[in-house]
Amino acid sequence: MARLRRHRVKPPGSCRLTAHEAQVWRSFRAAIQGEKGESAVAHMLDRSGLAVLHDAILPAGEGRTTQIDHLFLSPRGIHVVETKRYGGKLTGHPEDERWRQRFAGEAPDAPPRLIYSPVMQNAAHCRAVYALARLVDPTIQVFSHVVMTGTAVLSPALVACTLSLSKLETLLHDLERNVPRGTLIDAWRRIGLACHASGHQ
């Protein structure tokens, strides 16, 4: 008689993923975390009383488009917001193209993950916004804000070039609430029309 061997069943949390599966899981988790961060910022902006656009898709030249997390209008100009939700420890410099990310428990000699700089990413978004605004008035100012909503510990250089949610709230509170001047309103409308022309409602 053949004897049946019992195989211990591992709980789902202890199964080992292939490198590809691990990458897919990290991407999925990052997307979910990113949506949480964008929702928190969107809620704060919506409560500010300022004119706001979320998930704006604008032309970026040569037939390309770029997606911007949030835009808002103040008497100072047009503000472009990029939201990121990271964990671990982030190091780098505002002018670096890539930031370095490490997590607790990793081997000291393990290479850091390289993340494309959100500051650089948002600079491209600002160029797309200004390309539309300057058609109305080239003196209109476009401001870049990178908001970090996750648990990541940032190096001092990165803290200096980003905003936490509390700092964003302070910025919004300190902005004047008087009505923006005429050309700013015209530029804002042009940007809104460009979003609709890109098929984004």
Image (tube, rainbow, N blue to C red):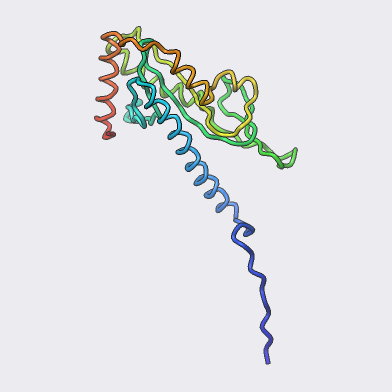
- Extreme residue in the right direction: 108
**Relative to 156, is 125 on the left or the right?**
left
**Relative to 176, is 90 on the left or the right?**
right
Q: Quadrant of the C terminus?
A: top left
**Rendering coords of residue 68 (x, y %):** 39, 29
**Relative to 90, is 170 on the left or the right?**
left
**Rendering coords of residue 132 (x, y %):** 31, 18
- Extreme residue in the bottom direction: 1
Q: Looking at the rendering, which quadrant does residue 176 occupy?
A: top left
**Rendering coords of residue 144 (x, y %):** 45, 19
**Relative to 46, is 12 on the left or the right?**
right
Q: Looking at the rendering, which quadrant does residue 50 occupy?
A: top left
Q: Nearer the viewer, residue 121 or 69?
A: 69
| Total numbered badges shown on the rendered structure | 0
Residue drawn at point x = 25 percent, y = 30 percent: 196
**Rendering coords of residue 29 (x, y %):** 52, 45
Residue drawn at point x = 27 percent, y = 14 percent: 185
Q: Quadrant of the N terminus?
A: bottom right
- Relative to 16, residue 43 above or below: above
- Relative to 21, residue 58 above or below: above
- Relative to 43, residue 50 above or below: above
